[in-house]
Image (cartoon, grey):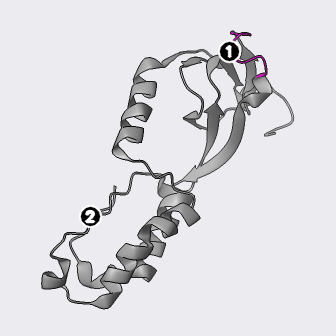
Amino acid sequence: MTWTENFASADSVWIKRILADNAEQFHGVIVALYHNNTFAWAPDYSVYTSWQKSYDLALASGHTMFTASQLENFLQAREESELTWESDSEGVEVYCQTTTAGLALIVPQENLYRPTVSTHDAGASENPNAVQIDTVRILGSPYWRIVLPQGKFLLSFERLTNRQGGIQ
């Protein structure tokens, strides 16, 4: 989370830098708090214009914007979903049951091949290919980002040391 009371430097350039840094390496929550008496503290027009542009800048940099009710629904969906995992010398298996589409897992890529996906719930999601898998970097380290549709899935990660030929 990023927070500042230094309104004099909270212009559009600063907002863009914070949003870009977060989108590219931190992947955290940003809370923008513009006090109604900002101009008493920092009577600078650039602060006002940065407030006006901040929503569009966040969307343009790939951030998800929530209303309070959307955030509540997201948190409820996370709470209602199930996640268990087992690990041994061969690899890691993660069982996921999601109650809504769009929830994601972030898994360190260290020593793990791209996961294979199988479905356990043909009625909810017949296509394991509907699971979206890509790479994100968090503070320079690679992670698997796995976006799940609604349903039950088993993600199987094989350890790199179990295959010959190096990293895929």
Q: Residue at x 25, y 79 (%)?
A: 7
Along the viewing direction, whichever of 12 and 22 lies nearer the viewer:
12
The amino acid type, in three-letter code, at marker 1 is: Ala
Label 1: how many Cα within 10 Å (few below 14, some 14–19, many 20+):
some
Majority SS type along the magenta span: loop
Q: Position of residue 91 (x, y in %)?
A: 66, 20
Magenta region: which residues?
121-127
Q: Is residue 54 left or right of residue 85?
A: left
Is residue 110 among what the camera can see?
no
Is residue 160 among what the camera can see?
yes
Along the viewing direction, whichever of 18 and 47 lies nearer the viewer:
47
Q: Residue at x 18, y 71 (%)?
A: 36
Contact, mark 1 vs mark 2 (Cβ under 8 Å):
no
Helix, strand or loop under label 2: loop
Q: Residue under label 1, please give it.
A: 124
- Taking 148 as reference, is 144 above or below it? below
Q: Position of residue 110 (x, y in %)?
A: 62, 38
- Taking 65 as reference, is 34 above or below it? below
Q: Position of residue 105 (x, y in %)?
A: 56, 33
- Taking 47 as reference, is 122 above or below it? above
- Does the magenta run of residues contain 108? no
Of all residues shown, which one is farthest toward the bottom? Answer: 44
Q: Residue under label 2, please give it.
A: 33
| Total tally of numbered discs in the picture | 2
Residue at mark 1 to residue at mark 2: CA–CA distance: 40 Å
Label 2: how many Cα within 10 Å (few below 14, some 14–19, many 20+):
few
Q: Quadrant of the C terminus?
A: top right
The amino acid type, in three-letter code, at marker 2 is: Leu
Along the viewing direction, whichever of 130 and 114 lies nearer the viewer:
130
